[in-house]
Amino acid sequence: MDTPPRDVPETPTAEQLVERWSELEEPEARAAAFHELPREESDEFFLMLPAHEQAALLLALPSGERRLWMRLLAPDDAADVLQEVEDEGARAELLGLLGVAARYEVRALLAYEEDAAGGLMSPMFARVRPDSTAEEAVRYLRRQAETDLETVSYGYVLDSEQRLLGVISLRQLIATRGTQKVHELMSTDLVTVREEMDQEEVARVFSQHHLMAIPVVDAEGRMKGIITADDIVDVVEEEATEDIQKLGGMEALDAPYLRTPLLQMVRKRAGWLAALFLGEMLTATAMARYEDEIARAVVLALFVPLIISSGGNSGSQATTLVIRAMALGEVRPVDAWRVLRRELTSGFLLGLVLGTIGFARISVWQALFHTYGEHWLRVAATVSISLVGVVIFGTLAGSLLPFLLRALKFDPASASAPFVATLVDVSGLVIYFTVADLVLRGTML
């Protein structure tokens, strides 16, 4: 009798492993799954991982395998991986696995701050001599293309001291007469960034000029490397993630959500929550200050949540808009006065909208249910006027707080929406009961 054929397990692919990667929490499980990939798939998968996961996978692999994967990385990517390794001994071991030339380049990159242009750049760029002919330059670029260059679309024209003179495209070299000199063809209208420039500023330069790569130079104009558009995509994601987390009222996480240890997650959230809780205690203090007014006119307490939430919401809107505009370079510190005038007008108009809705709501409920007594018109006026004042204050506080934080050398994103809302809650109560005292004096108060 014939033996039935056994089911041969299907060899996994890189795409399949990507889908289940987050489910594999233990480093050993990830290493085992990685070993199941065919060689060509494992190369693709490893290069697909972000730097922090490449580092974790390298440390989970047997020491004899690490050399292969470290040498697969370009110098800038290897530097990113090493920056993710906290243990100095493990970092030195991984660095020692690189070739002599690559090790020198990676050490140079590690000397820069992680979030500086120098830390993002790749030293593997195409060089061209200014006195070369177009034909010579093409041949020279062809030889350089056999190495691990970031891109060969552009050649960077350097003098003998490595100062950047101009840039020339491969297309231009191919399309021109072979005897024409590079210095006659190159473009000298250059967009460069300094090696110490912050990565957020670098991202803004990319956004403004729509370039595929930007040269990085030192103070003397010597070219140190290039930053490509795909490098900056990760930066934009990282900066946006950090700002969004801060706007949510917490410290920015150092790792993806599912890879952040539980106790670290609690620590990063607890600090801000405690600060906000203490801030909200001031709201209770303000309520106690107006205890007598509330006792004489209980109806006022009905609208406290309405008043403080409107001020908090308007402040949250304003701070979110201003922080995002700062991040995109649309608003600078010198624009504070323009923002103040703009938000003052916006706050007044928004307050009028909410005040009108509040007045209409009280009028309708009074007509239907006689809820607010004989002085309902004064109550409606109190609520409406208070809404205008609270919304104006909320928009001003929310829009100006990021400018204040930047002037104090703090991250404007620290002006989180919950923080602004807590600040406006207390002031909103003061505004509300001050207006009530003026409007209802002699009647309900």
Image: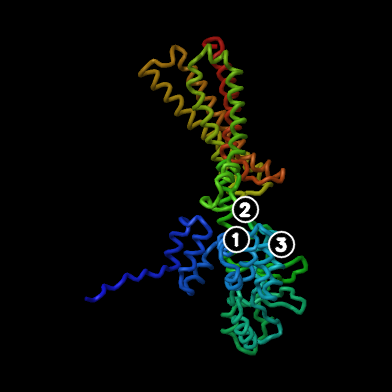
Q: On screen, 274 above or below 149?
A: above
Q: Amino acid at mark 1?
A: Gln
Q: Which residue is painted at 59% across and 31% down in the image?
A: 277
Q: Secondary structure at mark 3?
A: loop
Q: CA distance from mark 1 to mark 3?
A: 25 Å
Q: Amino acid at mark 3?
A: Tyr
Q: Amino acid at mark 2?
A: Gly
Residue 291: image x %, image y %?
57, 15
Image mark for residue 375: none
Residue 337: image x %, image y %?
66, 41
Q: Which residue is mark 2?
A: 329
Residue extending farthest bottom: 179
Q: Are marks 2 and 1 in contact (CB under 8 Å)?
A: yes
Q: Which comes sooner in the sequence, label 2 or label 1?
A: 1
Q: Quadrant of residue 214?
A: bottom right
Q: Secondary structure at mark 2?
A: loop
Q: Which comes sooner in the sequence, label 3 or label 2?
A: 3
Residue 100 relative to residue 301: left or right: right
Q: Quadrant of the N terminus?
A: bottom left
Residue 361: image x %, image y %?
42, 25
Q: Which residue is mark 3?
A: 112
Q: Quadrant of the C terminus?
A: top right
Q: Secondary structure at mark 1?
A: helix
Q: Which comes sooner in the sequence, label 1 or label 3?
A: 3
Q: Are marks 1 and 3 in contact (CB under 8 Å)?
A: no
Q: CA distance from mark 2 to mark 1?
A: 10 Å
Q: On screen, 243 above or below 14?
A: above
Q: Residues within 10 Å of mark 1 (few under 14, many from 20)?
A: few
Image mark for residue 208: 1
Q: Residues within 10 Å of mark 3 (few under 14, many from 20)?
A: some
Q: On screen, 351 above or below 117?
A: above
